[in-house]
Image (cartoon, rainbow, N blue to C red):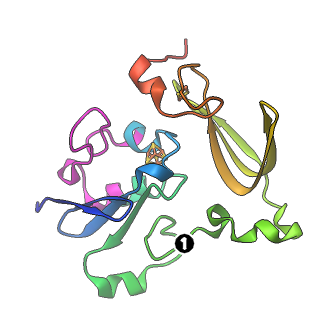
Amino acid sequence: MEKDRKKFSGGRRYRNEDITVYWKPDACVHASYCYRELIEVFDPGRRPWVDMSGASTDRIIEVVNMCPTEALSWKWNDNERNLEVGPEHTNHIRFRRPELMGDEAEEPEAWEKPVSVRIMYDGPIIIKGDFILKYDGNTKEMRGGLISLCRCGASNKLPFCDGAHRKTGFEDI
Ligand code: SF4
Ligand code: FES
């Protein structure tokens, strides 16, 4: 399988013969779906951390689509195929995710998205939807957004998760 790893503005990209996966570290909320689902491909302890030869293209697409942010996205190497892709490809590079872009922030009716809270095993709490977060005297309006709150206490960006739980080996009992 052809391997290719290059920088692009805002991150890195990784190729196999079928697809290119894009990685934007600034967008990652350390929700850990990628490496929990497919450590053979997404291994934060390895350099480079993405190995496109670790699984089939279908499986890589499936796991990239699980990423709740735009940190991971993908497209076909054959551009013709990109034109055929349907909306089920949630993290496909052609599909922006308006609910994460803040475009709706001025619209009062944007406060419609249900809030979901997910406690990640050995990791942060992920909160998604329309909500207001109050912390340390700050108020943050989240409209269709997603945040990741630290549960381990080791983050340097409290109350937000910065991925430190991995380094400290934080574990749920
Ligand atoms: S936000 Fe996406 S890239 Fe970051 S850990 Fe979660 S699944 Fe992986
Ligand atoms: S839970 Fe991620 S840094 Fe604490």
Q: Which residue is mark 1?
A: 96
- Residue 73: image location, x then y, percent: 41, 62
Q: Residue at x 35, y 61 (%)?
A: 22
In this view, the residue in front, 60 or 23, is 23
Q: Relative to 37, is 97 above or below?
A: below
Residue located farthest toward the front when viewing the structure as drawn: 137
Residue located farthest toward the top when viewing the structure as drawn: 173
- Dot 1: what SS? loop
Q: Quadrant of residue 49?
A: top left
Q: Relative to 97, is 168 above or below?
A: above
Q: Residue at x 77, y 66 (%)?
A: 105
What secondary structure is the magenta-colored segment mainly? loop
Query: Crowdedness of circle 1 by 10 Å Cα count: few (<14), some, many (20+)?
Result: few
- Residue 134: image location, x then y, percent: 81, 37
Q: Is residue 14 part of the magenta span, yes or no? A: no
Q: Relative to 29, is 151 above or below?
A: above
Confirm if mark 1 falls within 8 A of ligand 1.
Answer: no
- Residue 15: image location, x then y, percent: 22, 63
Name the side, left or right, on which 23 lies relative to 131.
Answer: left
- Residue 127: image location, x then y, percent: 69, 42
Name the side, left or right, on which 62 lies relative to 100.
Answer: left
Name the side, left or right, on which 110 lies relative to 11.
Answer: right
Amino acid at pointer 1: Arg
* Quadrant occupied by the N terminus: bottom left
The magenta region covers 37-60
Q: Quadrant of residue 145?
A: bottom right
Residue located farthest toward the right when viewing the structure as drawn: 108
Q: Residue at x 50, y 59 (%)?
A: 70
In this view, the residue in front, 89 or 10, is 10
* Quadrant occupied by the C terminus: top right
